[in-house]
Image (spheres, rainbow, N blue to C red):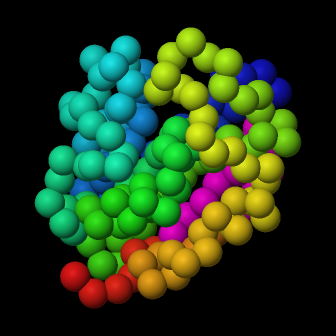
Amino acid sequence: MDQARIDEFQQEWLVSKATGQCLHIGSGMKPIPGAVNLDPNPDRQQWAEVAGDGCRLPFADASFDTLVSSHVLPLWDNLSDVLYEMARVLKIGGRMAHVVPDLRYAPSRKSSSYQFERQHGGWYGPSDFRQSLHGLDEILVVTNLTEFTEFNWSFKFEALRIGVE
């Protein structure tokens, strides 16, 4: 399967998860209509409504029903901090859905000349990623962590925001 078709599958999955008031982090050139699109990449902010960073989201607590992202989780050096910040802007019962590059099959971007594309973390499949979620169970319940059936470039991760505000 070619890269364009893989991107299309990933985007279709994200759009299907973007319900209610939705924040789309790492929207790049593929913003989701009706969502608040944010991208930390200065070269891609022209397609986003909001500039920002996943570690310091410019939104009040419990602002969104859903949060989606594609291939951005490895950009930050502390996955727990980023997921806590993402959970902060979700309403209790809100959902997040992420597409995560699978380093068993996807090339690493560590050699990229763009600092924002350098990966701090990277996971070799869903089982490897699940270990990174240790300690987050007071804010997130993982409802789906599986591979895409259509291709092996990425895997998908869904979680439900729990806890008290």
Residue at x-position 56% and y-position 12%: 113
Q: Quadrant of the N terminus?
A: top right
x and y, in percent, of residue 159 in the image: 51, 69
Q: Determine whether, in the image, residue 3 is placed left or right of residue 44.
A: right
Task: Give the extent of the magenta segment.
Answer: 146-159
Magenta segment includes 8:
no
Against 139, is 32 above or below?
above
Residue 99, given in percent of the width and then of the height, sits at: 59, 47
For residue 148: magenta?
Answer: yes
Q: Nearer the viewer, residue 150 or 144?
A: 144
- Which residue is drawn at the image coordinates 42% and 36% (left, top)? 26
Residue 124 in percent (x, y) is at 80, 50
In the image, is residue 141 above or below residue 68? below
Image position of 103 with respect to 156: above or below: above
Q: Is residue 148 left or right of residue 141?
A: right
Residue 77 is left or right of residue 65, and the answer is right
What quarter of the picture does the C terminus occupy?
bottom left
**Foreground of the two, 88 or 154:** 88
Determine whether, in the image, residue 4 is placed left or right of residue 113: right
What residue is rendered at 18% in x and 47% in y? Answer: 58
